[in-house]
Structure formats: C-alpha cells, structure tokens
C-alpha cells in the first residue's frame, strides 16, 4: 500500500521554504472558507476573523514551530509578552502610524476632532485589539511566517513574501461592498499597500526591538485603530503613511549593506 502524508503529518524537520508551503497549504484555504461565510450570508465578520486566526493559523504555526530547528514554541510565546530592548521602541510602535496619519489628515482637512472621548475610545480599541487579536496574529505573521521567510530569502524578500501571504488569506475581504471592478481594484491596492508597508516596518521593529512580538502587535493594533482619527473619505492617508514609512526602512544603513535575513540587521 502507498501511504500519503499531509503537510502537517510529515515527521521530517521542514526547511524554511517547506514550512511556509505547509503553513500556506492549511492556513490559506481555511481563511478563504471562514472569511467567505459573512460575504455569502451577511453575518458579522468578526467571529470569522477570529476563527481564521485561532483555527486556521495559530495551531499550524505552533505545530510547525515545534518541528522546526531555529526556535521553540516556548521562545515564540515568550517573545509575545517580552518588552522590546530598549523599551523606548514602544514609543514609535505606538505612535508612528497614528501621528503620521494625523499630520497628513491635518494637511488635507480630513481629521476627526481630537476630543477626550475619541482618545479614550482609541485607547480602549488599541488595548482590546492587542489582547484579543493582534498579539496572536503577529505571533503567526511576524514570529513564524516572516522570520522563517527572512531566514530563507532575506529581509526584503521575506517581508514581501509575508505581505503576499497576508493579502492572500484576506482576499475574500476585498469583495465586501464591491459594486464594480474599480471597487475591487481599489480594495486590493489598499491591501497590498498596507501589507507591504506593515511587513517592512514589522521586520525592522523585530530586529531593532530585539524580537519583541509585543511591540510588533502594538504597531499593528495602532495601525488598525488609526482609522478612527480620520473620516472615512481620508482613510487612504493611513495606507500611504504606512507604505511610506515602510519604504523608508529600506534606507537604513544595515539594510543597504546586507539582505541576508534578520540577522543581517542586528
């Protein structure tokens, strides 16, 4: 008899590229299935985002981490609660995108009034998103996927591969509220800009913050919450700012000298 192996039952230690393929083979179909349900039924999206994360992504990333050679599940989980070194990296992680977006909005007249109520709501939004979603999301994307990709293909290509996978798993969301091809193209462009900008920022912060996934999750949470600082017609500023800051990371001297993965930036 001929035995078959699924991507997750193969007991051999996977190489980085193999780990990414195995992750993609499970996580992407799971994400497409879960995120398509609200599109077809009109049900709320949030529960299916959580299902994608906790059923389709986290278990796969932890299992592949356990079978890998370069880190352990314990180290990965420890990075999720560890402050960056130096701890001052929490400041740009928390403020870079919101402040940059707010400055852009002030130039275009698209900012919401900065009331106490807005700032309180923004803080609550960041903290709740950080604990419920972004910490675990970045454990997968930064801690497993992007580190694995950077180790195999270098910092820039690793960031772009991670961005491509990030966009791919969220593809059903690009179909929400779409009336024509222009709407779909706009949604995809936004996802690509955010994905590339965020993954470049995340890759640099992972190195400069000494591997603190907590700091990366703060960056992700504040990016999401920044939409509250501008009116809906000016939310494009957030994506332009994020992509711009991400591209600026490429000007770092260490990046110009080497593109050999995260170790080349230390």
Image (cartoon, rainbow, N blue to C red):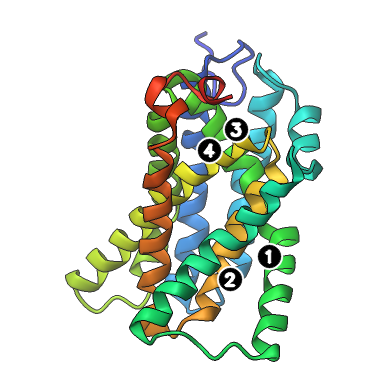
SS under mark 2: helix
Dot placed on the residue nearer the N-terminal end, 4 or 2:
4
Which residue is at 32% across, 66% downward?
A: 187
Which tag is nearer the camera, tag 3 or tag 2?
3
Q: Is residue 252 above or below residue 173?
A: above
Q: Which residue is at the front of the view, 125 or 19?
A: 125
Q: Mark 4 points at which residue?
A: 204
Residue matched to label 2? 225
Where residue 207 is drawn, which disc sits there? 3
Q: Distance between the residues labelled 3 and 1?
A: 23 Å
* Nearest to the observer: residue 215 or residue 51: 215
- Looking at the image, tell me whether mark 3 or mark 1 is earlier in sequence order: 1
> Which residue sits at x=50%, y=52%?
31
Residue 182: image location, x then y, percent: 18, 71
Depth check, front residue: 52 or 142: 142
The quarter of the rendered structure image containing the C terminus is: top right
Answer few, some or many: residues within 10 Å of disc 3's Cα (few below 14, many 20 plus, some between 14 and 19): some
Residue 216 position (above or below residue 258): below
Residue 56 position in % (x across, y down): 59, 46
Q: Which mark, residue 129?
A: 1
**Real-space Cα separation, disc 3 to disc 4, in angstroms:** 5 Å
Query: For the residue labelled by badge 1, is the local secondary structure a helix, a strand or a loop?
Result: helix
| Residue contact between numbered discs 1 and 2, judged by CB atoms under 8 Å | yes
């Amino acid at each position: 008899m001929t035995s078959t192996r699924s991507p997750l039952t193969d007991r051999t230690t996977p190489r980085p590229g193999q780990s990414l393929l195995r992750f993609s083979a499970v996580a992407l179909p799971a994400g497409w299935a879960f995120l398509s349900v609200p599109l077809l039924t009109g049900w709320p999206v949030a529960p299916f985002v959580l299902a994608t994360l906790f059923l389709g992504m986290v278990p796969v990333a932890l299992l592949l981490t356990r079978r890998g050679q370069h880190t352990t599940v314990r180290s990965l989980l420890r990075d999720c609660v560890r402050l960056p070194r130096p701890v001052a990296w929490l400041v740009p992680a928390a403020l870079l995108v919101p402040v940059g977006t707010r400055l852009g909005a002030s130039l275009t007249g698209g900012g919401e009034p900065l009331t106490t109520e807005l700032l309180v709501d923004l803080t609550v939004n960041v903290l709740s998103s950080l604990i419920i979603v972004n910490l675990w999301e970045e454990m997968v994307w930064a801690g497993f996927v992007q580190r694995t990709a950077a180790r195999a293909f270098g910092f820039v290509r690793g960031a772009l591969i991670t961005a491509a996978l990030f966009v791919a798993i969220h593809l059903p969301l690009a179909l929400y509220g779409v009336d024509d091809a222009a709407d779909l193209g706009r949604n995809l462009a936004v996802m690509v800009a955010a994905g590339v900008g965020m993954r470049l920022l995340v890759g640099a912060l992972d190195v400069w913050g000494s591997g603190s996934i907590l700091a990366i999750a703060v960056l992700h949470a504040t990016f999401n919450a920044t939409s509250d600082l501008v009116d809906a017609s000016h939310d494009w500023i957030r994506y332009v700012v994020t992509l711009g800051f991400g591209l600026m990371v490429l000007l770092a001297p260490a990046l110009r000298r080497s593109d050999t993965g995260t170790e080349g930036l230390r």
